[in-house]
């Protein structure tokens, strides 16, 4: 069973504050020209595991897979475009 963000916030109200701060930080990173990575309930496959959304400052969003190799290199594979720009 998947838990929703609202259920998380009910259980731990401080998590909402943490998430709002993270949202502000993400907006600032995008303004500075730095892509961000996150999970989104709208894309359930990103809610756990190694799939994430990568958003670029121009608004393009991609589903990506991140893998940590045995020698501790982080590999990223772009799987598909999630929106049209």
Image (cartoon, rainbow, N blue to C red):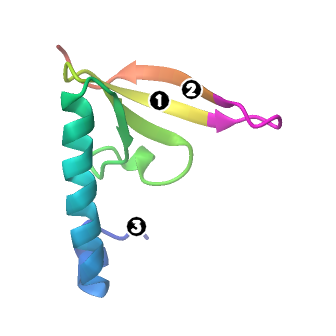
**1 vs 3, front mark:** 1
Disc 1 to disc 3, C-alpha distance? 21 Å
Identify the residue at image location x=19%, y=50%. Answer: 24
For the C terminus, the quadrant is top left
Instruction: Inspect the magenta stretch and tell me whether residue 13 lies in it.
Output: no
Looking at the image, tell me whether mark 2 or mark 3 is earlier in sequence order.
Answer: 3
Badges 2 and 1: C-beta atoms under 8 Å apart? yes
**2 vs 3, front mark:** 2
What is the x, y in percent for residue 4?
29, 68
User: Which residue was labeled with disc 2?
Assistant: 76
Magenta residues span 67-74
User: Which residue was labeled with disc 3?
Assistant: 2
**Mark seen at residue 64:** 1
Q: Secondary structure at mark 1?
A: strand
Identify the residue at image location x=36%, y=71%. Answer: 3
For the N terminus, the quadrant is bottom left
């Amino acid at each position: 069973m998947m838990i929703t963000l609202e259920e998380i916030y009910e259980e731990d109200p401080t998590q909402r504050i943490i998430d709002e701060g993270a949202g502000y930080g993400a907006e600032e990173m995008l303004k500075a020209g730095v892509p961000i990575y996150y999970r989104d309930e709208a894309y359930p496959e990103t809610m756990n595991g190694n799939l994430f959304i990568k958003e670029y400052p121009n608004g393009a969003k991609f589903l990506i897979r991140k893998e940590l190799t045995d020698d501790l290199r982080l590999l990223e594979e772009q799987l598909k475009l999630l929106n049209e720009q």
